[in-house]
């Protein structure tokens, strides 16, 4: 009897020790992976309109070669799955360019627009639903701007017409996002099983969206996604 009780006691202890690992195993089988390649189609020195007065200038093409120039995100088809952004994200100006060239921010999130250059900048956007103007700012100054409407916000400097960037305000159902370089493969791991929209954006290119179904324990391969201008 004592031997039977002792064996049972050991079995219970062994089960309790393994229970967290078993729980983690169940969680891992409830998620999957999205993978693919994103490619920006070549374009020849397009003319863009920059500055408050619509001064034409040639694009330098720097945005298409940046290591973080392509924004990829997943949107859930279910209820709101996004989390709140509690601290400002930094949108800097260095070397007469915006850093980063594409900045994702959560809906109702705040962006700290900072000047780290030894010259004045005047950062603004005429995007209808997220219009702002930080005014002329010397080195070291910043202004916090909150964005309450999802979508791409085109950003320029009224002093330097070659400067351009995008602040992308994420929709409320965004699950996660990553940034990659054109031509690189991407992988989004630990995505809960279900149906999603995979969306891709790059500065100066048309946004693209495709439906993706995540199956537990499997990888959803979307192939090569090419963005055109």
Image (cartoon, rainbow, N blue to C red):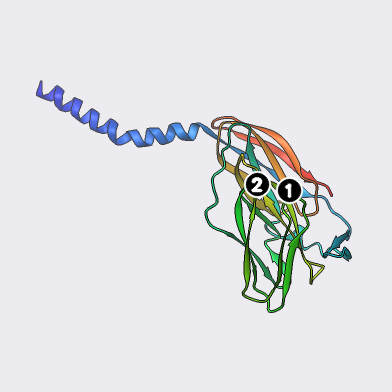
Between residues 187 and 152, which one lies in front from this camera angle?
A: 152
- The alpha-carbon separation of the residues under discs 2 and 1 comes to 11 Å
* Quadrant in which residue 187 is drawn: top right
N-terminal-most mark, 2 or 1 = 2
Q: Is residue 54 left or right of residue 67?
A: right
Work out which quarter of the rendered image holds the N terminus and state it: top left
* Quadrant in which residue 69 is drawn: bottom right
What residue sits right under mark 2 in the picture?
A: 170
Q: Residue furthest bottom?
A: 118
Q: Is residue 19 left or right of residue 220?
A: left
Q: Is residue 1 shown above or below 114? A: above
Percent x, y for residue 108? 61, 50
Check disc 1: other Cα within 10 Å, few if <14, some if 14-19, many if 20+: many
Q: Is residue 210 shown above or below 121? A: above
From the image, state whether disc 2 or disc 1 is nearer to you: 2
What residue is at 67 percent from the left and 33 percent from the top?
Answer: 212
Task: Find out whether the residues at labels 2 and 1 contact each other: C-beta distance under 8 Å.
Answer: no
What residue sits right under mark 1 in the picture?
A: 201
Percent x, y for residue 40? 78, 50
Between residues 180 and 11, which one lies in front from this camera angle?
A: 180
Q: Which mark is residue 107?
A: none
Q: Is residue 124 left or right of residue 16?
A: right
Percent x, y for residue 33? 59, 38
Q: Residue furthest left?
A: 2
Percent x, y for residue 104? 65, 53
Which secondary structure lies at badge 2?
A: loop
* Quadrant in which residue 132 is drawn: bottom right
Which secondary structure lies at badge 1?
A: strand
């Amino acid at each position: 009897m004592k031997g039977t009780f002792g064996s049972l006691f050991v079995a219970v202890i062994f089960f309790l020790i393994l229970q967290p690992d078993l729980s983690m195993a169940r969680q891992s089988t409830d998620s999957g992976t999205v993978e693919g390649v994103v490619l920006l189609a070549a374009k020849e020195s397009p003319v863009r309109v920059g500055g408050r007065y619509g001064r034409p200038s040639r694009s330098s093409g720097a945005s298409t070669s940046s290591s973080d120039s392509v924004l990829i995100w997943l949107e859930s088809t279910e209820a709101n799955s996004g989390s709140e952004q509690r601290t400002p994200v930094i949108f800097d100006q260095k070397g007469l360019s915006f850093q980063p060239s594409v900045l994702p921010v959560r809906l109702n999130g705040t962006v700290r627009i900072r000047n780290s250059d030894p010259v004045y900048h005047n950062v603004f956007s005429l995007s209808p639903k997220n219009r702002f103007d930080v005014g002329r700012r010397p080195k070291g100054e910043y202004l916090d701007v909150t964005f309450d409407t999802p979508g791409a916000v085109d950003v320029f400097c009224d002093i330097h017409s070659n400067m351009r960037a995008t602040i992308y305000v994420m929709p409320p159902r965004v699950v996660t996002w990553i940034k990659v370089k054109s031509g690189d493969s991407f992988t989004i791991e630990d995505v809960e099983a279900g149906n999603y929209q995979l969306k891709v954006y790059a500065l100066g290119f048309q946004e693209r969206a495709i439906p993706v179904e995540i199956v537990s324990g499997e990888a959803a391969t979307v192939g090569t996604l090419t963005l055109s201008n």
